[in-house]
Image (cartoon, coloured by chain):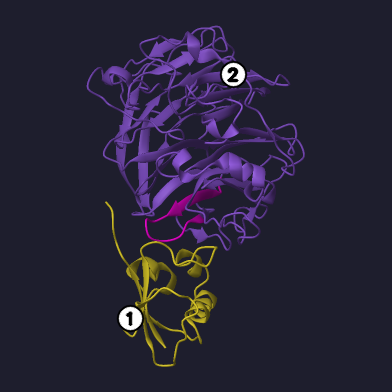
Amino acid sequence: MRVLIPSALRSYTRVSRVEADGATLRDLLADLERQFPGMRFRIVDEQERLRANMRVFVNGAAVHDLSRPLQPGDDVCIVLALSGG
Amino acid sequence: MARTPVVPADRKATAAPMAGRASRAASPRRLVVLVATRKGAWLFHGDARRKSWQVDGPHFLGHTVSHLVLDPRDRRTLLAAARTGHLGPTVFRSTNLGRTWKEAAQPPAFAKASGDLAPRAVDHTFWLAPGHPGERDTWYAGTSPQGLFRSEDGGGCWVPLASVNDDPQFREWMGTVQDGTPDGPKLHSILVDPRDPAHLYFAMSGGGVHESIDGGSRWKPLVQGLQVVEGFDPATITFHDPHTVRMCPSNPDRLYQQNHCGIYRIDRPGDSWVRIGSKMPRRTGDIGFPMVVHPRDDDTAWVFPMDGTTVWPRTSPQGHPAAYVTRNGGKTWQRQDAGLPESQAWWTVKRQAMTGDAQDPVGLYLGTTSGELWTSRDEGARWSCIARHLPEIYAVEVAELA
């Protein structure tokens, strides 16, 4: 499925949209890590929590649970909710 | 990241003192001042006389860089502790002075939660410390919230020390976020005894000073003699807030400390700190963040006092910045403000933002939260500005290049 990558993470992917697979959001992040080493830890902390200000949308709906099932063809957006000065 | 403008130093500055003392420093090497800021990192390359500085940067623009350190064992490897406000913390490594950077394969991260201990995530790596000279690829890192990590491959893979990070007693001493510094409680001042790689110290804000003589398996608090905020019990380790602890290179048995509650010295194997800051002028006080020790003289150390009265402004007292030096182990202190602004300069200098080189005479360097970088080529006798308009400066290190 297609995954939108925020500009702050494009140092890993070089492009704004990448292809990745996974039966769940957790699996998808594992696939992204396999393709782009180091990227996952900047999205998810060591206790398996999405980091503050990190938002994931699947087909336009916000997802907070890494076990959320995914289907081939889902549209996944990783977005940074920018804040602060 | 090409090098750009040449930044002139104050040409009126005079090299001087140290009369009667033999020059023991090696011939001048090329120096680089490493400046870590809230919005990126800069390298200032000096000439042999430390008179002009060439700026290289920004590196990691927009990233918060807590510490940038050159490995003194090979004089070419740089480690940077970085994060942005929105991405997880990591460590970058460069072996070509920042032309290219490689991210750590396994940045500092706590172990998964187990038992009754609350799960924790590293917010940022705060402190980087090269390991023993005989252990070439060993590094230590201190994090916020408080954690101690070790790398044995030059900073690629970081392993948590469970003896600290997952020890119930340590977790109690670390307290809560409310007990720590405004941007998170920190583990810092990781010191390695040059005579023995298994002899280690670290400090926590808050959580006291700790020592290990077995390479980090077991630890013992070292807080006797340190004061805590009035009304609290100094027997409770949580209440101790060391800001910076430094080991004298010429005498590893002597440590100096700038604490939330004064300036201290300890001479091991003694186990009690002595408050040497009580000899500071009363109007200035002995509150501050950095502590700098002389590379060859264990009686000489510098501090940069901050206003710790009333609501703790933590700015230069009376808006008149000054370093203070002792040349007799803290018996007396002398003010050093020549060249620094004389009024309306409400500087804050953070704990990692002042350092000294190993030249003779020693050069001092400091950075302010208002983004100014200053130096003295003569052990604090006279100061000049290297750069202005940088972002908030978190850390300043100086290193000799190979």
Which amino acid type corresponds to the residue marked 1 in the rendered image?
A: Ala
Displayed quadrant of residue B107: bottom right
Which amino acid type corresponds to the residue marked 2 in the rendered image?
A: Arg
Q: Taking A9 as reference, is B223 left or right?
A: right
Displayed quadrant of residue B387: top left
Name the element at disc 1. strand
Residue A1 higher or lower than B219, as above or below: below
Residue that label 1 marks: A61
Residue that label 2 marks: B265
Residue B333 higher or lower than B341, as above or below: above
Which chain's residue wears label 2? Answer: B
Residue at 57% x, 63% y: name it.
B105
Quadrant of the frame with the C terminus of chain B: top right
Q: Position of residue A44 (x, y in %)?
A: 48, 67
Please check the rendered image and state whether residue B89 is part of the magenta-colored stretch, yes or no.
yes
Q: Residue furthest bottom?
A: A72
Name the element at disc 2. strand
Q: Residue furthest right?
A: B214
Displayed quadrant of residue B85: bottom left
Which span is picked out in magenta?
Answer: B76-91
Query: Which shade of the palette goes to chain A?
Result: yellow
The answer to whether dots 2 and 1 both sit on one chain is no
Q: Which chain is purple?
A: B
